[in-house]
Structures are given as structure tokens and as C-alpha cells.
Amino acid sequence: MTEFENIAIGKSSIPALGITVIVMIVIPVAFFIYWRINHRDKTNISYLVAGAVGFIVSARVLELGVHYFCILADNPVSAFINGHTAVYVIYGTVMAGVFEEGGRYIILKFIMKKNRTRENAVLYGIGHGGIEILTVLLPAMMLYFAVAVLFSTLDVKGALSALNITEETAAAAFPSIQAAAAFDYPDMAMNVIERLFAILVHIGFTIVVFYGIKYAKGGYLILAILLHMAVDTFPALYQKGEVPLWAVEVWAAIWTVITLFIAIRLYKNMGEDL
């Protein structure tokens, strides 16, 4: 594992990662506290929980189950999807849109039948976007932080031993260790901004779906799916190495603004209660 001998932890890696971990926790908590304080009489914490559970079930259980067969497993289907960028992007965006927005629709229409206020729709979106931060990005940032600390305080052999990295797992672990070593303040800023966009866009998607339920207009579910697909297009292209990371962030900013513009108009048009 001689490639690890050249790993050098940057001076800003540990503080930048530490701040990122803290901010990743603060973002969903701050959104919840702000909305709850300002709309206490029209919100119920059950909607926050429903949003969190909805994300876990739709995106981390059902959608990942399909991805295992279609992307990760070694079969003709995964070979075809992974072998064609256009197919990969279409597949990935459709799955994300259908599973997450479909999950939102099912929960908000058939399970959360009480306290159906537009304020609770926002709370649901905070739960959905917040739990994504806490279960997807935060663990990765915490791992990077641990890697940076270990490689800065121990020798290479000790750090690899502490991380339980063996000859068999070294190749898979090396990119993550490189990323942790190179992490700096611009990376911190990009991760924070990206998560702010993500939680805002999830709130927007929820309002669009909720509006369709309120007025029995199925077209708004389709709109939410299409918006979700649009948001995820550049991230999927980035995964295939087709666009740079800065383009992904610009794309996310554009579609966050578009989604919020639509959602704010719908929110204002809604009555306070169903």
C-alpha cells in the first residue's frame, strides 16, 4: 500500500471538515426551529417525522433496492445503463423523481390526513431534506474528518490499521482518503451551499405536491417529478465525468430558484387549511 505514503493532510483539512460537520447538523435544526417558532399553531412535528421517514423509505430503501439490480449488480441491465451516459442520466433522474415525489404524494395524501396546513407541508420538506443531510452527507463528512485526524496524528501504518484498511480494501478506500486530505475551505463552502440548495428545493417539491393534493390536480405531481429530474440531471452527468463540479452547483442554483419561485406562488395561493 505504498500509494498511501504520499498522502499529506492539508493544513486546512481538519478545521474545514470540522466546521462542515457542525454546519451539516446546524442546517436542518435551524430550519426546523425557525419554522416551528414562527408557525407553532399551524405545524405539527409529526409532519417533520413523516418527511424524514418518507425520505428513508422512498430513497434509501426502495430506490436503492432498484439501483442495486440496475446499477450495482453485474448483469446485462446494469452493463447497458452504466455503459451509456444518456441512459444512465435518464434512469437516475427518473428513479429519483418517481420514488421521492411518489413517496411524498403517498404519505401526504393517504397517511398524513390530519392538520393538513401549508405550513405543515413546509415542515414535511424540512424533514425530508434534513434527514438527507444527516444520513447521507454528514456520515461522509464525519468519516473524512476521522481520516484527516488519524493521518495527521499517526503514521501511515497506524492510520490504516485504525481505519481497518487492508490490502484487499486499499484500492477502494484510497480515493476517499485522498479527498479527505485535500479538503479545504472552498470545499467546505461548496458543500454547505449545496446542502442549503437541497433542503430548499425539497421544501419546494413538497409544496408543489401538496398543492396538487389540496386541489386534486394530478398534474402537480408530474410537475414535481419533472422538476426533480431537472435538478438531478447535472449531478448524474457529473457522476459520469461529463461536467465539472462548479457546473453542478450553478445548475443546482438555477433550478432551486425556479422551483422556489413556483412553490412560493403556490404557497401564497393556498388557503390556510384544507
Image (cartoon, helix red, strand yellow):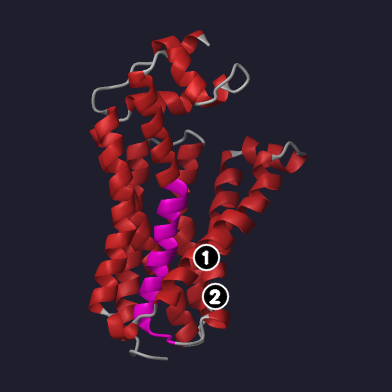
Q: Provide the residue designation for mark 1.
A: 53
| Badge 2: residue crowd in 10 Å (few <14, some 14–19, many ≥20) | some
Which range of residues does the magenta coloring cover?
115-137
Q: Provide the residue designation for mark 2.
A: 107
In this view, the mark in front (1 or 2): 1
Going by the numbered disc 2, the residue's amino acid type is Ile
The quarter in which the C terminus is drawn is bottom left
Using the image, determine if residue 129 lies above or below residue 86: below
Q: Residue at x 37, y 44 (%)?
A: 248
Left or right? Give the position of 75 relative to 54: right
Going by the numbered disc 1, the residue's amino acid type is Val
Using the image, determine if residue 180 lies above or below residue 79: above
Of helix, strand and loop, which mostly describes the magenta segment?
helix
Magenta stretch: includes residue 117: yes
Q: Residue at x 51, y 73 (%)?
A: 221
Q: Residue at x 67, y 52 (%)?
A: 66
| Badge 1: residue crowd in 10 Å (few <14, some 14–19, many ≥20) | some
Which label was assigned to residue 89? Answer: none
Q: Contact (CB < 8 A) between labels 1 and 2?
A: yes
